């Protein structure tokens, strides 16, 4: 008989123990995610519909809005689910996917910000 164990899910720490605070956290996370969706959606639609906004700077702004939506949609829905349904677990695969996607979207966002800074630097100096 070998001594082995496997991890199938992680237990998360709760943000609050009382139901009222859990619902408050859900409402706050919902408000933050809706504000981010609305703001980034407006940026995406303005850049996509405006013909005079088809310049490199606005192209990168469009991609920055898309990566921001991706990073928000990676972790916030699970946190909202945990707050609303009073659950504290996440699967191992789900946790790995969240970590990978969050690092990917944040690295992409940092790359776009760097490119945008260099584009502004070139347009000012040259």
Image: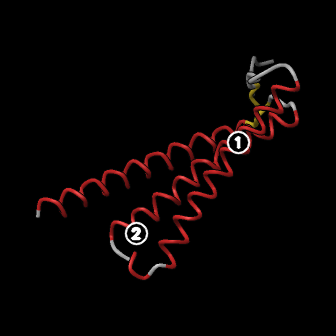
Q: Position of residue 99 (x, y in %)?
A: 58, 39
The residue where tag 1 is placed is 94
Q: Which one is nearer the viewer's eye here, 102 or 41?
A: 41
Q: Determine the residue located farthest toward the bottom in the rendered image.
A: 51
Residue shown at 88% from the left, 36% from the top: 85
- Label pair 1/2, CB-CB below 8 angstroms: no
Q: Residue at x 85, y 31 (%)?
A: 87
Crowding near the residue tagged with mark 1, few <14, some 14–19, many ≥20 C-alpha atoms within 10 Å: few
Which of 65/98 is in front?
65
Q: Quadrant of the C terminus?
A: bottom left
Q: Circle 2: is it few (<14), some (14-19), or many (20+) Cα within 10 Å?
A: some
Q: Please tell me which residue is depicted at 71% across the width and 40% down the height of the picture.
A: 29
Compare residues 17 and 92 and report the one nearer the observer: 17
49 versus 28 height, above or below: below
Residue 95 visible within the image: yes
Q: Is residue 5 visible?
A: no
**Would you name the residue on which mark 2 appears?**
59
Judged left or right of residue 10, residue 86 is right
Q: Is residue 97 above or below residue 40?
A: above
Where residue 74 sits: x, y (%)? 64, 47
The mark nearer the N terminus, 1 or 2, is: 2
Residue 78 is drawn in which quadrant? Answer: top right
Q: Determine the secondary structure under disc 2.
A: helix
């Amino acid at each position: 008989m070998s001594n082995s164990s496997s991890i199938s899910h992680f237990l998360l720490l709760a943000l609050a123990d009382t139901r009222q605070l859990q619902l408050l956290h859900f409402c706050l996370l919902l408000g933050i995610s809706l504000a981010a969706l609305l703001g980034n959606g407006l940026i995406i639609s303005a850049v996509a519909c405006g013909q005079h906004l088809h310049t490199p700077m606005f192209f990168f702004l469009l991609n920055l809005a898309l990566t921001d939506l991706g990073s928000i949609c990676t972790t916030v829905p699970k946190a909202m689910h945990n707050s609303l349904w009073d659950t504290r677990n996440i699967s191992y695969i789900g946790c790995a996917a969240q970590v990978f996607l969050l690092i990917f979207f944040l690295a992409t966002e940092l790359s776009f910000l760097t490119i945008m800074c260099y584009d502004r630097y070139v347009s000012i100096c040259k």
